[in-house]
């Protein structure tokens, strides 16, 4: 995916141009960091940790998209654009996409089955994403 793909997503209505707002980006990163920190706490249920980590990843990925001057209300698009917005490969965004599907099953069908491995992959992918976006902000 290239920068031209982001403009194509604007043409199809999946993204829109919006000026970068540093205060918003800082808030998204602060929220993502706090949620990721909490998601790493072993004394919480796997479901809670998954929810916290997933929402942390979304906040951080949205911050990366906002850094590029775009916005989307579609969570999947926010993750799908990570190769451009955060220069991340498929090993990260595919995990986030898989977790997006799991989250949708939980939200819309009441079915959430989380295993230890997926949770650890989500935590690792989210930490990688956070590190990358913090580097981009500097």
Image: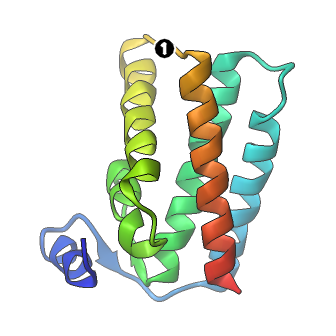
Residue 73 visible in rendering: no
Note whether 129 is above or below 7 in the view shown: above
Q: Bin the neighbour count of mark 1 within 10 Å (Cα to Cα): few under 14, some 14-19, many 20 and up.
A: some
Camera-side residue of 38 and 120: 120
At a point 43% along the width and 10% down the height, the residue shown is: 111
42 displayed left or right of 109: right
Residue 133 visible in rendering: yes
Viewport quadrant of the N terminus: bottom left
Where is residue 101 shown, x and y percent of the image? 36, 31
Rendering quarter of residue 80: bottom left
Rendering quarter of residue 31: bottom right
Label 1 belongs to which residue? 112
Where is residue 46 shown, x and y percent of the image? 68, 18
Where is residue 45 shown, x and y percent of the image? 74, 15
Camera-side residue of 26 and 64: 64
At a point 45% along the width and 29% down the height, the residue shown is: 103
Note whether 73 is above or below 125 in the view shown: below
Viewport quadrant of the C terminus: bottom right
Camera-side residue of 72 and 136: 136
């Amino acid at each position: 995916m290239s920068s031209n793909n982001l403009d194509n997503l604007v043409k199809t209505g999946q993204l829109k141009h919006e000026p970068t707002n540093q205060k918003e980006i800082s808030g998204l990163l602060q929220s993502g960091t706090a949620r990721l920190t909490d998601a790493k706490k072993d004394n919480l249920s796997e479901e809670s940790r998954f929810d916290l980590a997933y929402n942390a990843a979304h906040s951080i990925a949205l911050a990366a998209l906002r850094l590029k001057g775009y916005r989307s209300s579609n969570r999947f698009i926010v993750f799908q654009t990570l190769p451009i917005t955060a220069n991340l490969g498929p090993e990260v965004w595919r995990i986030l996409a898989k977790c997006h599907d799991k989250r949708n099953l939980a939200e819309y069908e009441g079915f959430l089955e989380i295993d230890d491995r997926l949770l650890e992959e989500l935590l690792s992918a989210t930490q990688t994403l956070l590190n990358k976006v913090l580097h981009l902000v500097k």
